[in-house]
Amino acid sequence: MSQFVDLSHVYHWAGREYLLHPISSGLLHTTWRVEVDNEPCAILQKINVQVFKRPNDIVFNLELLNKYLQENNSTYSIMLPMLTQSGDRNWWQDENTCWRAFPFIKDSITIERVTSVEEAYNAAYAFGHFTAQFHSFDATQLKVILPDFHNLSLRFKQFSDALQSGEGQRIQKFETILHDIQSYSWLMHYWGHEINNKLPVRVIHHDTKISNVLFQRNAGAPIVIDLDTIMPGNIVSDIGDMMRTYLSEENETSCNWEAILARASYYSNIIEGYKKAMKGILTDAEINAMPMSGIILIWMQALRFGTDYLLGDLYYGATYPEQNFDRCKNQLYLLKSYIQIQDVKIAFDSWKSKYVRQ
């Protein structure tokens, strides 16, 4: 226990003998399951302050949303950090480290990969249901946790700059897939005219991977977790991220190119689950953008992987020299397959005919 931190003066359970079991699924924070008397009681996290530079803004957002739910007598609840012994819900800081704990939810599980259309539907419903709770809430009150996180214009500029300033040999290698990347550049016009100008600002999760859904073993409603990235945004971020991460049996590190395929049945269940959760709240512009959301997020991620490769793997890192190049190719294969889904192809061809001439 001494290798972590003494929490006996922070949380009520820490005054007793307890064990910490590492949870390795998280990408940003360091996480443990806390057990007292062989029973799980909490989830403890050490916060990555290099990514979340203003952690108190996260607490601000959660408390603001929780206050809104209470004032509107909502039965919906969001997962808040546990109170410390002093009654504080904010981070507990030890020198330059931020810590927090969440209650452990019994009879619940997380999964790392979507393996059924039911899981895709239920996850999409959970994220849509979360956003629907705040339909009448002014999302602009929220702090922006990660500025420009899903800003396609910025990601395209970063990629274009990297083509000029990146490592010479990597730029040369990237020429082999540059045409594929640039063939979608008309999406910048679509993004500017149809997404930025027409979609309402809502309370958006921004990280809808399947491991951020807590499924109940007793068939209860799934719970949305990992609320650090909640901030103002539009539905393209959440729906697109589900399309990007749920549709293929291969993950974003796979080099099994021919197996990187978008499953149409999973696509339709994501759309159906999200629409049902939003219960008529969606605008016509949002409904029209749903098929395109996957195109935007997949292409954006290809740009981000490509940018990191060109600049020497500074953000994502790499376990071998060409990994981010391969990750970029992976997303391009996924994008091509995704566009073959009937509803997506209709939307893609329609918008392309409008904006490719510009």
Image (cartoon, grey):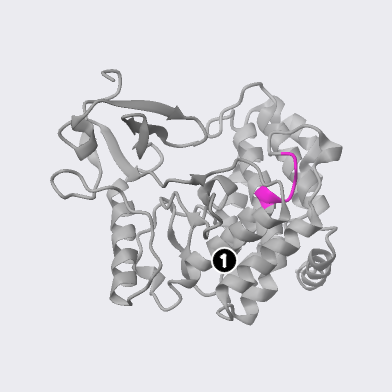
Residue of label 1:
235
Q: Is residue 6 magenta?
A: no
State the extent of the magenta-drawn residues as a range. Answer: 244-250
Looking at the image, residue 18 lies above or below residue 212: above
- Judge from the rendering whether residue 101 lies leftward or rightward of residue 88; answer left or right: right
Name the foreground residue: 236 vs 312: 236
Q: Which residue is at 57% across, 71% downward? A: 277
- Observer able to see residue 45: yes
In this view, the residue farthest toward the top is: 3
Instruction: Give the x, y percent position of residue 23.
Output: 46, 31
Q: Which residue is at 71% across, 46% downward? A: 115
- Judge from the rendering whether residue 213 lies leftward or rightward of residue 265; answer left or right: left
- Judge from the rendering whether residue 250 lies leftward or rightward of residue 65; answer left or right: right
Instruction: Give the x, y percent position of residue 114.
Output: 67, 47
Quadrant in the picture for the C terminus: bottom right
Q: What residue type is labelled 1?
A: Ile
Give SS at disc 1. Answer: helix
- Which quarter of the picture shows residue 254? top right
Q: Is residue 247 magenta?
A: yes
- Which quarter of the picture shows residue 3? top left
